[in-house]
Image (cartoon, helix red, strand yellow):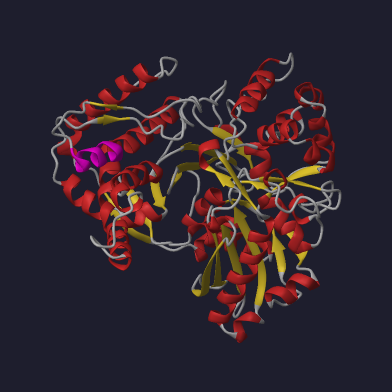
Amino acid sequence: MENKYVIGVDYGSDSARALVINAANGATVGQAVCQYPRWNQGLYQNAAAGMFRQHPLDYLESLTSCVTQALEQAGEEVRGQVVALAVDTTGSTPCPVNQAGVPLALLPGFEENPNAMFHLWKDHTAVSEAEQITKTFSSWNGIDYTRYQGPYASEWFWAKILHTVSVDPKVRKAAYSWVEHCDWLPALLAGETRPEKMYRSACAAGHKAYWNSAWDGLPDRRCLESLDPYLGQIWSTYGAGPRPCSENLGCITHEWAKRLGLPETTIIAGSAFDAHAGAVGAGICPGKLVLNIGTSAVDMLVLRPDQIPAGNFSYACGAAEDSILPGFIGVETSQAAYGDAYAWLKKLLLFPLTEIEYSADIISPQQMSALSQAAEESILRELEEKARKLPLKGAVTALDWFNGRRYPQVNEHARSALNGLHLGIGAAELYQALVLATAFGQQTILRTLAREEIAVESIIAVGGIAQKSDYVMQTLSDVLGCRIDVSQTVQACARGAAIYAATAAGLYSDIMAAQQVLCEGVLRSYTPNREKAADYKHLYEAYLDLARWTDLGMICNP
């Protein structure tokens, strides 16, 4: 294994990151980040309408850029010793394709049509379609397909397809099938993009398309066709079945080997969604919960099939076969807003600098730009320092449902709320309330899992917030009443993808064997302050009371 290297590429919401690591010891020898050019110009998105689309060229151009830059940093000797490459992506991020598996946005006549592009995970244009799917999946006189994943979400595969073909006849006619971003890229690199033949990720299939061996694959074709006959076509073109992330898809094509500057012997591995890859990069194993904290938060666990609770527990979490580690059931639960809640307050406070135009007699454009940048970089840090000193008693109560509620009990119409405001409340008090709200949202999730006898023995956190915010993480540890380890892995998702690559290349017997060598250690640990337990208990009860009042249908058992 000496002098062998693997590449992991992580496709996030705004950029792609490539990581080149030594397959023998996990050392990083090259890395690079590339922003999506069109996306970062604000193209193909309308936040007010909940529409977020990405052009396939953004993915292809950023792949070329970040991989070639990372390899240049690693050096020519390393370039010739790369043995495998894998990617992870956001999801569910599907795209309509033709019979050859080409995204419609790459074809004449569709280049600027957002409906012909990849529908980013956070696109919420299909809320009504998701509700329609939930109703049909649970009451069509057949299997209850919501059993393992719960109510269907507008962010997911079938809802996005149903919405798009309902509003765009041209796309409906041209789209032979639909593919996830995490399926299309490895299929493209390996040279087999025909929908019936291409690689389909077990992660995407299980969590978003509702593939399950309990009903021998996708939901019944008749059930899907009762929603729209077009969905039967997607069912028939989906292929033989999903495969795990460590799958060897074959060698890279001549075209892509040349474009990326890689040996033509480079193996292309399977893929998964970014949070799941991050869990692998952080060292997930039975009993260990990986908490990926970013704009949202995703909790992941792996269970043996015999550990899955009896009955319907889908209100608490989603479960899918082989979605994180092959041979295990991947369990996923999440909060739709974490860092996004803090970003909302930040944007609110920056209004005088970002939304008001001042006369040059008062402040020059250069000074204004410098002031705005300084405030942008320091505002959350200053809020943290002030919030840290605030007493807990009398804290404002907030809900973390800025993007709706994922778990427990999915409700995309749920909204945040604030209680306890008075004229003495300032920015620091609001920030404290939001940090408490996100921590209490996590506490509700873990208590729900415990009620279903899904055991969590330890927690390791990854993501920017976990590594950068002592205040947020200490508050979370205090609220949960348990130790939280923070992984020192900066690019956990890309490292997880690199672990897929090393396993697919046969350098390790399985993913867990690869993790023992390629995962990095713990950066720091947080332990709870037991003296504050009574205060947090009182504040959590206030959080649950506000949750009940705001969403009368929610069951909150402290």
Horizontal side of 389 relative to 258 (left or right) equals: left
Horizontal side of 90 relative to 400 (left or right) equals: right
Horizontal side of 25 relative to 105 (left or right) equals: left
Residue 141 picture quarter:
top right
The residue at the point 78 percent across, 31 percent down is 231
Horizontal side of 276 relative to 94 (left or right) equals: left
Task: List x then y, in percent, for residue 65.
Answer: 61, 71
Instruction: Please provide the residue range marked out in magenta.
Output: 426-435
Verify whether residue 428 appears in magenta: yes
Task: List x then y, in percent, for residue 15.
Answer: 54, 60
The residue at the point 78 percent across, 26 percent down is 228
Q: Main secondary structure of the magenta part?
A: helix
500 in relation to 292, above or below: below
230 in relation to 251, above or below: above
Q: Is residue 481 at all visible to an observer of this figure? A: no
13 in relation to 495, above or below: above
